[in-house]
Image (tube, rainbow, N blue to C red):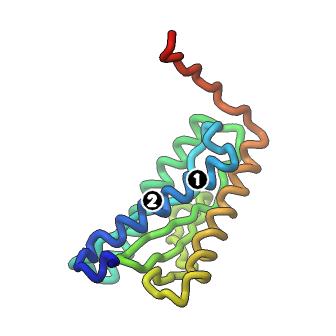
Amino acid sequence: MCLRQIGNNHRIARVINQELNRYVKWVFRDADLDKYNIAPNIVIKAVSVAGLDKDALTKMINKAFQVHLDKYAAFYSAAHPELAAPRVIYGFFAVQHAVMLFTMDAARPKVRPRLITDFNLAQKDQWLDASLCVAIPVYLARARLLQLTSKMEPMEEEEEDDPDL
């Protein structure tokens, strides 16, 4: 049974959020991006629409991007002032079983995020479209971060304590 069938609609977006985060973490780890001191150029957020109208949802998405962008800009100006941070920020916002994909230009922080597409993960016949809507932006984000890390040194790995000693 799925969450919708047993009446747990409020948990659907959280599960999607959790799985998107897990996927992005795996993709970045697969590219060894976890070995670098970088800020992600992807925002993933579950949104509860209970009692929200379209304007309130828009404000919530804009605020989430702005919060991420402020942290993002502060991180790169402090940690890597000599490098240009990736300009495109991708955002996945899950509203129950629908996901909206936005982009934002980090060099133009006052411009609103742009909706690229939205897709419904509950539609069984749309699995390929939904998969591509997730995979393509994640891999574009990863590719840009890989370009950035080509100009950086990896973080020093901490030596793990040997439990046998």
Question: How many residues crowd around disc 1 within 10 Å: few (fewer than 14), some, or many (20 or more)?
Answer: some
What's the residue type where badge 2 is placed?
A: Gln
For label 1, the SS is helix
Which is closer to the viewer, label 2 or label 1? Answer: 1
Which residue is at 64% across, 30% downward? 155
Q: Position of residue 51 (x, y in %)?
A: 21, 79
Which residue is at 44% across, 70% downward? 93
Q: Give the residue number, with chain letter if any, for mark 2.
A: 66
Which quarter of the image is occupied by the N terminus? bottom left
Q: Going from the N terminus, do you reach mark 2 or mark 1 first? A: 1
Question: How many residues crowd around disc 2 within 10 Å: few (fewer than 14), some, or many (20 or more)?
Answer: some
Which residue is at 58% across, 61% downward? 89
Q: Position of residue 141 (x, y in %)?
A: 65, 59
Identify which residue, 69 or 26, lies in the foreground: 26
Identify which residue, 49 or 35, lies in the foreground: 35
Q: Position of residue 143 (x, y in %)?
A: 72, 57
For label 2, the SS is helix
What's the residue type where badge 1 is placed?
A: Trp
Say which mark, if any, is on residue 143.
Answer: none
Q: Position of residue 9 (x, y in %)?
A: 28, 77
Which residue is at 52% across, 43% downward? 74
Q: Give the residue number, with chain letter if any, for mark 1.
A: 26
Locate residue 112 relative to residue 143 in the image: left or right. Answer: left
